[in-house]
């Protein structure tokens, strides 16, 4: 039995381990995002930021699915099992759509394959060096990253709509909604299969590691993307990126309180209750509050 496992190594039958506040379903959406070179207001720098994020998603989402799937057999809570099923469905479609997006970006001359390969190497190291619960811890930490960035994007959706082309707006808002919907699934699985002290240690360790290596990877991803536009040595380009991330609209600055909440022992992702943002997106797209859109 792994260090930190519960005594029975599974959730007690009939117990409720899901802390989700929002029912959700898989949407089989398809997009044609990535066909325009500088789709964010004609700005190569901010576009590069989103493209660097996208480069991490195909392999990253598959890793998330694998880490949750490896613990699924230990869960007996029907609600959490149902959420795992939808989590896996959503993440696999995210992987598919961002791979298609990345391929379109690559066709414009950007080194997306090199960047994706760098991300895959990092994931391979985690698979080799970490036990399964530690791998799930990395998933939980990365899901926290995506959840707080998604929350900011949903809050700032009108600003994003103003600057992004319509297809990219739809892709990123759809992704943000679904990351919000399933933001607690991996967290609840890790909590269910871990002893209380190990659960806290694992998720704190994972977030510290994620913060370091995510940002190192992002720097190199951005450098490679900016190089394709001849901007890798431009102080103005890097200053523009800093302004976007930390000043206006400042998603990283605005996400600091939510990021730090992770370190509270009693933290749960749905303590950041943003169901209203999901409901607003669903209303805009003709979905009822608790029903996903029909498959494409």
Image (cartoon, grey):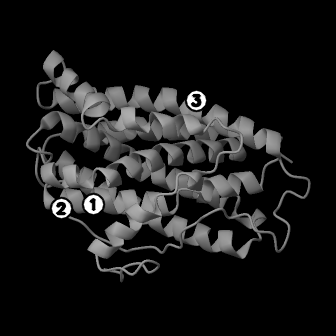
In primary-sequence order, the first of circles 3 and 1 is 1
Q: Is residue 53 left or right of residue 139?
A: left
Graded by Cα atoms within 10 Å as few (under 14), some (14 to 19) or many (20 or more), the crowding at tag 3 reads: few
Residue 19 is at least partly visible in this image: yes
Q: Is residue 270 left or right of residue 289?
A: right
Q: Position of residue 42 (x, y in %)?
A: 8, 42
In primary-sequence order, the first of circles 2 and 3 is 2
At x 70%, y 44%, the residue is 266
Graded by Cα atoms within 10 Å as few (under 14), some (14 to 19) or many (20 or more), the crowding at tag 1 reads: many
Question: Where is the C terminus found, in terms of image quarters?
Answer: bottom left
**Mark 1 in CB contact with mark 2 (< 8 angstroms):** yes
* Residue 230 in which image quadrant: top left
Q: Position of residue 64 (x, y in %)?
A: 54, 53
At x 65%, y 32%, the residue is 205
Q: Nearer the viewer, residue 102 or 5?
A: 5
- Helix, strand or loop under label 1: helix
As drawn, 183 above or below 138: below
Q: Which residue is mark 2?
A: 167
Q: CA distance from mark 3 to mark 1?
A: 29 Å
Q: Nearer the viewer, residue 109 or 44?
A: 44
Q: Which residue is mark 1?
A: 171
Q: How many numbered markers are drawn?
A: 3
* Residue 199 in which image quadrant: top right
Q: Which residue is mark 3?
A: 208
Q: Nearer the viewer, residue 183 or 265?
A: 265
Residue 130 is at least partly visible in this image: no
At x 22%, y 22%, the residue is 238
Q: Position of residue 184 (x, y in %)?
A: 59, 57
Q: CA distance from mark 2 to mark 3?
A: 34 Å
For the view shown, which residue lies furthest in the left direction? 42
């Amino acid at each position: 039995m792994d260090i930190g496992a519960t005594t029975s190594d599974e959730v007690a039958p009939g117990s409720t381990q899901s802390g989700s506040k929002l029912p959700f379903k898989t949407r089989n959406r398809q997009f044609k995002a990535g066909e325009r070179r500088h789709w964010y207001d004609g700005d190569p720098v901010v576009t590069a930021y989103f493209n660097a994020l996208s480069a991490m998603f195909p392999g990253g989402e598959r890793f998330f699915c694998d880490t949750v799937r490896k613990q699924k057999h230990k869960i007996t809570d029907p609600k959490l099992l149902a959420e795992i099923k939808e989590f896996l469905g959503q993440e696999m479609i995210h992987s598919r759509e961002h791979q298609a997006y990345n391929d379109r970006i690559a066709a414009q001359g950007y080194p997306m394959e090199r960047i994706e390969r760098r991300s895959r190497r990092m994931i391979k190291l985690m698979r080799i060096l970490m036990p399964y619960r530690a791998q799930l811890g990395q998933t939980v930490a990365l899901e926290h990253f995506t959840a707080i960035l998604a929350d900011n994007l949903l809050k700032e959706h009108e600003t994003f709509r103003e600057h992004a082309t319509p297809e990219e707006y739809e892709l990123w808002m759809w992704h943000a909604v679904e990351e919000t919907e399933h933001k607690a699934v991996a967290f609840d699985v890790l909590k269910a299969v871990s002893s209380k002290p190990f659960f806290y240690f694992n998720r704190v360790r994972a977030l510290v590691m994620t913060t370091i290596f995510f940002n190192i990877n992002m720097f190199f991803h951005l450098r490679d993307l900016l190089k394709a536009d001849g901007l890798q040595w431009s102080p103005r380009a890097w200053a523009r990126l800093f302004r976007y991330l930390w000043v206006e609209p400042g998603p990283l600055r605005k996400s600091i309180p939510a990021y730090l909440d992770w370190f509270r022992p009693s933290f749960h992702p749905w303590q950041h209750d943003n169901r209203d943002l999901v409901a607003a997106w669903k209303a805009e797209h003709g979905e009822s509050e608790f029903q996903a859109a029909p498959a494409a």
